[in-house]
Amino acid sequence: MSVVDVREAITRVHHEEWARVVAALARRFGDLDIAEEAAAEAFAAAVGQWPADGVPPNPGGWLTTTAYRKAIDRIRRENKRDDKQKEAQMLYDDDPPEPLGAIDDERLRLIFTCCHPALAIETRVALTLRMVGGLTVPEIARAFLVQETTMGQRITRAKAKIKAARIPYRVPSAEDLPARVSGVLAVLFLVFNEGYLATGPDTDPVRHDLTAEAIRLTRLIRALMPDDGEVAGLLALMLLTEARRTARVSASGELVALDEQDRGAWDAALIAEGHRLVRERLAAGMAPGRYQILAAINAVHTSAPDVRDTDWSQVVALYDQLVRLDPSPIVALNRAIAVAELDGPEVALAAVDRLEDKLAGYHAYHATRADLLRRLGRSQQSRAAYDKAIELAGNTAETAYLTRRRDQLG
Amino acid sequence: MQYLVSVIDDKTNSGTPDEMAAINAFNERVEAEGHWVFAGGLSSPSTATVIDNRGGEAMFTDGPFVESKEYMAGFWVFEAPDLDVALKLAAEGSKACNRKVEVRPFL
């Protein structure tokens, strides 16, 4: 196996096994900090050993066992320094790590702990991306437009609070479940989005592992809460978005906008499943939450065999409904994009320009402006907006797309 | 595991008869369920004295160590296995005393 193959294998195993290793160790040691550090050390050991020794037949088992040993080593070291350490009993507990069974429950347990309501929402997201998604602190910092050191401190503080306040490591009881789920959904949606449009220049533009993970975990929660409309809505939203994934990046690695995508390349099975969920929610006759509305918007798009068949008035009506629930500037930006199709780019540009105060640091704001200015024939301003969007965009496929559009300006 | 549940208010000893009755009923239930450690109401911060005996001679300063509009007007100490149980008790306590509360774990 070549060095490149081994490196690819390690990357793949990291995507597949990170959360399992962290979850198994957190369960075993009751300490997220130990679990995270030991998991990171185990992966570092893999990077050091696998190129020479080869990839072990059961990489997940190798990593869990290695991480387990690293954790025991750390606990021993700390006990030498301070014999009042609470983990003292672990010294005398040399049981092998739990086998890689019951993993879904372990990961779900990890998710509910990371998404505990005693943590601020931005902390829950950061912690889940780190512990469950396996993203690095710089990747998470980029996703939320904050400094790396700030993000690092946020995660460290969260782990300290979980430990000191004894936030339990378990799936909540049935009566607490509904309240706890909405926080989890917000986190999973953000994980999905990070996968769908990866923020780092050093990662693949679309990280299928993260979108797949977000979908898998959302399916798990739907299995637990089949009657929850927002769980169904989020799952439908993810499926209808994921269905377009392969059409979304060209062979040359460039992002393909919705109106230019080869709709024949969309995944018909995922679309059918997503539409089924949307119809199920419509039939329930209850006021939809934001995920159900977003899913309905995506159902409109995926129902159109050609972009010209899109029912834009329906899309704008759904965005109007969404704005009432979620008056955030990003929703207003997306609504303006739909308005451009219904009422023309001039009306849309006026709406977008009103968002400058809040979105000046967001690449999609400038990319949207650039496109609207281009359609209005204002090339010079469009070019400046593309420049700004390219400067702010981290995703390689998006940068390629924006660069081509800019260079095509007359 | 013990948790301090501080009752946050901008005045002290201000419970209405209805609130006091609700607090008493809540306290009885906390005791019956085995979570009770201690509880009490506190006089206002203006009655506090700060003592600093780090320099060999005790210095007394009139007033609280930090001035704030809202302060700890009373507290419970609960025994609870984890934060979920403590938060549930604190939520019921907040309802009973009709005040905001803050939960902090003991070391």
Image (cartoon, coloured by chain):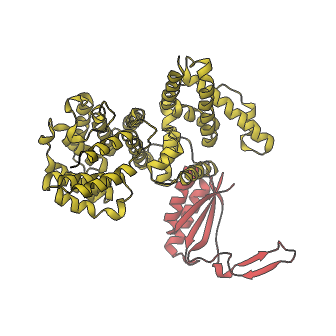
Chain colours: A yellow, B red
Residue A96 at what x, y percent from top left? 66, 25
The mark tally for this picture is 0
Tell me if residue A369 comes above or below residue B23 in the rendering. above
Residue A306 at what x, y percent from top left? 14, 37
Residue A72 at what x, y percent from top left? 70, 33
* Residue shown at the point (56%, 74%) measured from the top left: B70
* Residue shown at the point (28%, 53%) measured from the top left: A383
Q: Does residue A171 appear anywhere in the picture?
A: no
* Residue shown at the point (14%, 53%) measured from the top left: A342
User: Which of A141/A217 is in front?
Assistant: A141
Tell me if residue A171 comes above or below residue A14 in the rendering. below
User: Which of A48/A231 is in front?
Assistant: A48
Residue B50 position by quadrant: bottom right
Q: Residue furthest left?
A: A309
Residue A20 at what x, y percent from top left? 53, 31
Residue B3 position by quadrant: bottom right
Locate residue A238 relative to residue A275 in the image: left or right. Answer: right
Q: Does residue A134 appear anywhere in the picture?
A: yes
Q: Residue furthest front?
A: A410
* Residue shown at the point (24%, 49%) measured from the top left: A286
